[in-house]
Amino acid sequence: MSFDLSVWALPDGATPEDVRAAVQQCRNGRHGERQPDPRVVAFYRAITASYPDRPNGSRTPWAVMPLHAAADHVEMNLDPGCPDQVLLDIERLAGQYRLMLFDAQDGSVYPPPAVRLPG
């Protein structure tokens, strides 16, 4: 069984509920016609530069390849045994590109690390 995460490029001020609604639309096969968000494109290029999502003979953390990439998000199905560094890299890149993280296991939504408020 895989560990599933996705990163979302939503407008500033988006709430966890907005992310969950976007996830549900994706699951229902509804992807709006729009140009890819540059943040999503940059994230995809960066994460696949480190961890290719096309079979090439090297070890990969992905349980499903290629990654599901849409205009506003990238879904990643990780092998449960993947190194912790992969998760750290996903979180770092999500923060770098101002993307919200969605954890499909429990529905948690995490804002980009750079915008977390002191608590």
Image: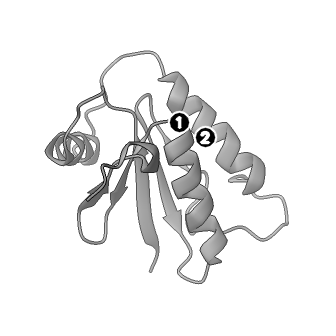
Residue at position x 63%, y 66% in the image: 86
Residue at position x 31%, y 54% in the image: 118
Residue 77 position (above or below residue 71): below
Foreground disc of the pair 2, 1:
1
Residue 52: horizontal and vertical position, in percent?
74, 53
Q: How is the image coloured?
A: one colour
The reply to whether residue 68 is in sight is no
Residue at position x 60%, y 76% in the image: 84
Amino acid, disc 2: Tyr
Query: Which SS class for mark 1?
Result: loop
Residue carrying label 1: 97
Q: Earlier in the sequence, mark 2 or mark 1?
A: 2
Label 2 CA crowd tier, 10 Å (few <14, some 14–19, many 20+): many
Query: Which SS class for mark 2?
Result: helix
Q: Quadrant of residue 57?
A: bottom right
Q: Nearer the viewer, residue 111 or 47?
A: 111
Residue 119: horizontal and vertical position, in percent?
25, 59
Quarter of the image containing the N terminus? Answer: bottom left
Q: Is there a contact, CB below 8 Å, between mark 2 and mark 1?
A: no
Numbered circle sitting on residue 44: 2
Q: Is residue 81 left or right of residue 33?
A: right
Numbered circle sitting on residue 20: none
Amino acid, disc 1: Tyr
Residue 85 position (above or below residue 36): below
